Image (spheres, rainbow, N blue to C red):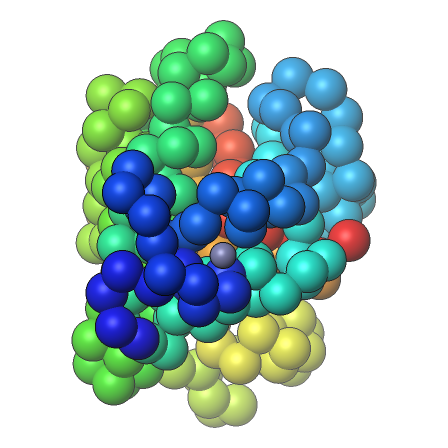
């Protein structure tokens, strides 16, 4: 991708346009979700794990623009897309009274092999920008992905984690105690990955968990 082209439609960007042309920006399928009212993303987690509130910026993939953005973010080394989305979302989050005590932002972790291959976690810049907006700490050290094996996990756990192709663990749970924590991810589909992350944070006492994703599959 040559700089100066729209990530949505490949049109040449005009002065003042950033990453997306004005047309694509207007066509972005924004959800009207917030961190107060119940929305369909919340309902995905009902009865599965304890989360205070879930929200998403866009629907995916209602049109090609969001699909192209996420594709470039994940596979074309365009981390700046994550920074841009995080800055945008972070500004909205500053207005959310339910998020005013969030002091820690954690991305859904990638396994280190995958991270090495990709070169980055596609949620890093997104999460950092949001943490900056909220005056929170951004950490990739507290929630980690580990390989699981049949010998190390019971059958029930194996079943639970099978669909997420891995297990997540919390490190230094004491440092997360008593906090409002925001978990960030790129695409919310079935919620299995985020559910596994929430379960991994079970050892953390007296916490409130929030989830913010770039996109949600309707
Ligand atoms: Zn465009």
Closest to the observer: 149 or 83? 83
- The image quarter containing residue 7 is bottom left
- Residue 12 x, y percent position in the rendering: 36, 61
- The image quarter containing residue 161 is bottom right
Closest to the observer: 160 or 13? 13
- Residue 44 x, y percent position in the rendering: 76, 48
Say whether residue 215 is left or right of residue 180: right
Closest to the observer: 67 or 107? 67
- Residue 145 x, y percent position in the rendering: 36, 69
Say whether residue 92 is left or right of residue 155: left
Residue at x-position 46% and y-position 11%: 95
Closest to the observer: 149 or 43? 43
Q: Is residue 76 above or below residue 177?
A: below
Residue at x-position 29% and y-position 38%: 16
Does residue 145 appear in the picture of this structure? Answer: no
Does residue 160 appear in the picture of this structure? Answer: yes
Q: Quadrant of the N terminus?
A: bottom left
Residue at x-position 31% and y-position 22%: 134
- The image quarter containing residue 180 is top left
Q: Is residue 90 above or below residue 72?
A: above
How many numbered discs? 0
- Residue 40 x, y percent position in the rendering: 78, 40
Say whether residue 175 is left or right of residue 69: left
Q: Is residue 59 above or below residue 121?
A: above
């Amino acid at each position: 991708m040559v700089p100066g082209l729209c990530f949505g439609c490949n049109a040449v960007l005009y002065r003042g346009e950033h990453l997306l042309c004005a047309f694509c920006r207007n066509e972005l399928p924004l959800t009207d979700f917030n961190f107060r009212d119940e929305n369909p993303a919340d309902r995905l987690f009902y009865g599965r794990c304890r989360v205070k509130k879930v929200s998403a910026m866009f629907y995916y993939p209602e049109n090609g623009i969001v699909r192209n953005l996420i594709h470039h973010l994940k596979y074309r080394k365009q981390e700046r897309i994550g920074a841009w989305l995080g800055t945008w979302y972070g500004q909205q989050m500053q207005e959310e009274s339910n998020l005013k005590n969030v002091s820690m932002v954690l991305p859904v972790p990638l396994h280190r092999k995958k991270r090495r291959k990709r070169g980055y976690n596609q949620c890093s810049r997104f999460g950092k920008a949001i943490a900056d907006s909220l005056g929170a700490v951004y950490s990739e050290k507290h929630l980690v992905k580990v390989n699981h094996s049949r010998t190390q996990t019971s059958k029930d756990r194996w079943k639970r984690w099978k669909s997420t192709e891995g297990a997540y663990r919390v490190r230094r749970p004491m440092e997360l105690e008593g906090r409002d924590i925001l978990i960030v991810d790129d695409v919310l589909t079935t919620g299995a990955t985020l559910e596994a992350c929430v379960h991994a944070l079970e050892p953390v006492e007296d916490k409130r968990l929030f989830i913010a994703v770039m996109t949600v599959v309707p």
